């Protein structure tokens, strides 16, 4: 049996194991070890288990993920989210659908200090969903808005998924962070445009606010207590990373310390909240590291199965414009996103598509990273997996899951439109890094 056929069988078995609810990290590790044994030897396969797991858990690059996850949870437990949401509500909340638009903006800004879409959705949603429902917003629109807005947190730096992609393909995390800013803002604007269309067609879904227009003093106070605090942390951590003052890991650590200092100064965090942030961070970090460890083993199997090389040869033999190939890859990512979570999808597909796109087609690896992460944003809200929809469901248990999935479709379209724009206009992702002189 050819290596390519063994690799294809391994992929099918992996999908089956996931369907049987076996943990993703275990599924990737088991298929990787068995497949590697079939292509080499049992001894060689058993040797890669301790080797790859140790190299993953002891890697300095992996500490970057830990620092930025901790940064997000500290922001959550310090009460910074409610202040941020209060500012965006005062900014646009009085307009039709304004609370939904405020939630999208709050998710985008909060993404500057939290690299996880699930954390962004749950933290902002815990404040936004009750407010929208109290003001007679449709439950479907309220929950769908949070599910869609949360994924923007994976584009705005710091982003855990950008870190994972960068480590998987050995690209600069700093460049990837900067490349996600414009696409993240673009997704935010497209989502707000979708809300405007939805509420114009049916004003009852998101009625205009009746609160008095905030004065300039009130708006300034809300900005000072919410937006400025986020801006300070973002400028210190990401700005220091850009100027070369910190490594990515140090930037996450500095950002975490900055949030703690702000919380102490404003007296917005107690010891219990600090311990809760550490506990939740540890759980999330452990899950991510085990998933990366399993994916590393699986990636070795995929590499020696020659599947990436086979795909590359196939693409090279096609007399098709490379933009058509990119649209096909985009559709594959959207399809995979319906069934796979973000992190395993990146870890599984990066070794396959990266050589094709960068080596065979000659595209920029940083631009491709932005496309991949935008595709994972779509996958995080599409059925049947739609991980962020399930996160939002936990915030509104009385809202049927089917209703949230129905409400999220306009945002699937808006996020897809933003992704296609970046696909057709690469400068939207690469322009800012080039302007800042880091590309």
Image (spheres, rainbow, N blue to C red):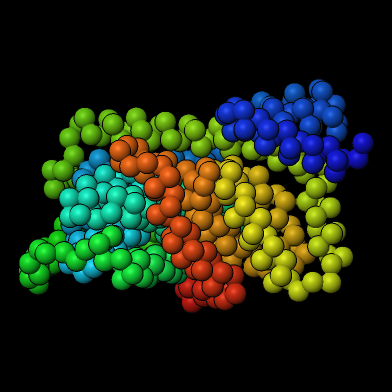
- The answer to whether 203 is drawn above or below residue 124 in the figure is below
- In the rendered image, residue 73, in percent from the top left (x then y), is placed at 32, 41
- Number of numbered markers: 0
Instruction: Depth check: give the residue in front, 350 or 395.
Output: 395
The residue lying at 85 percent from left, 26 percent from top is 41
- The answer to whether 116 is drawn above or below residue 281 in the figure is below
Question: Can the viewer see residue 67?
Answer: no
The residue lying at 7 percent from left, 67 percent from top is 212
- The answer to whether 4 is drawn above or below residue 421 in the figure is above
Instruction: Depth check: give the residue in front, 292 or 132.
Output: 132
- In the rendered image, residue 17, in percent from the top left (x then y), is placed at 66, 30
User: In the image, 140: left or right of 63?
Assistant: left
Residue lying furthest right: 1
Question: Can the viewer see residue 171?
Answer: yes
User: In the image, 110: left or right of 438?
Assistant: left
- Location of residue 218 (image quadrant): bottom left
The residue lying at 22 percent from left, 47 percent from top is 130
**Quadrant of the snapshot with the N terminus:** top right
User: In the image, 295: left or right of 132?
Assistant: right
- Location of residue 394 (image quadrant): top left
- Location of residue 28 (image quadrant): top right
Instruction: Depth check: give the residue in front, 326 or 224.
Output: 326
- In the rendered image, residue 152, in percent from the top left (x then y), is placed at 42, 57
Instruction: Depth check: give the residue in front, 258 or 102.
Output: 102
């Amino acid at each position: 049996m050819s290596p390519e056929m063994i690799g294809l069988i391994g992929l099918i078995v992996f999908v089956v194991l996931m369907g049987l609810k076996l943990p993703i990290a275990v599924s990737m590790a088991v298929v990787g070890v068995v497949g590697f044994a079939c292509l080499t030897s049992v001894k060689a396969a058993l040797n890669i288990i301790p080797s790859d797991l140790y190299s993953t858990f002891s890697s300095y690059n992996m500490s970057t993920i830990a620092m930025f996850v901790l940064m997000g949870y500290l922001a959550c437990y310090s009460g910074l989210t409610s202040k941020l949401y209060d500012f965006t509500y005062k900014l646009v909340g009085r307009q039709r659908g304004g609370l939904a638009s405020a939630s999208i903006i709050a998710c985008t800004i909060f993404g500057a200090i939290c690299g996880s879409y699930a954390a962004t959705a749950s933290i902002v949603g815990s404040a936004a969903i009750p407010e929208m429902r109290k003001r007679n917003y449709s439950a479907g629109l309220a929950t769908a808005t949070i599910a869609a807005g949360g994924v923007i947190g994976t584009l705005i730096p710091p982003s855990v998924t950008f870190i994972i992609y960068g480590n998987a393909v050995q690209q600069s995390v700093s460049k990837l962070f900067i490349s996600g800013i414009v696409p993240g803002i673009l997704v935010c604007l497209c989502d707000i445009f979708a809300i405007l269309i939805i509420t114009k067609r049916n004003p009852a879904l998101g009625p205009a606010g009746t609160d008095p227009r905030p004065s300039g003093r009130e708006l300034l106070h809300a900005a000072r207590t919410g937006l400025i605090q986020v801006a300070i942390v973002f400028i210190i951590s990401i700005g220091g990373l850009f100027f070369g003052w910190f490594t990515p890991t140090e930037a996450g650590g500095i950002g975490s310390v900055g949030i703690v200092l702000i919380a102490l100064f404003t007296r917005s965090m107690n010891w219990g909240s600090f311990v809760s942030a550490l506990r939740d961070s540890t759980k999330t970090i452990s899950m991510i590291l085990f998933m990366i460890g399993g994916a590393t083993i699986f990636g070795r199997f995929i590499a020696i199965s020659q599947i990436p090389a086979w795909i590359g040869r196939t693409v090279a033999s096609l007399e098709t414009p490379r933009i058509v190939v990119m649209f096909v890859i985009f559709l594959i990512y959207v399809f995979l996103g319906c069934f796979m979570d973000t992190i395993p999808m990146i870890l599984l597909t990066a070794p396959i598509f990266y050589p094709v796109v960068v080596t065979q087609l000659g595209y920029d690896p940083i631009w491709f990273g932005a496309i991949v992460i935008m595709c994972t944003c779509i996958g995080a809200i599409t059925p049947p997996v739609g991980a962020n929809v399930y996160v939002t469901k936990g915030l509104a248990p009385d809202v049927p899951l089917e209703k949230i999935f129905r409400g999220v479709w306009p945002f699937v379209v808006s996020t897809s439109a933003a992704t296609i724009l970046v696909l057709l206009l690469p400068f939207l992702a690469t322009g800012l890094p080039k302007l800042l002189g880091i590309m």
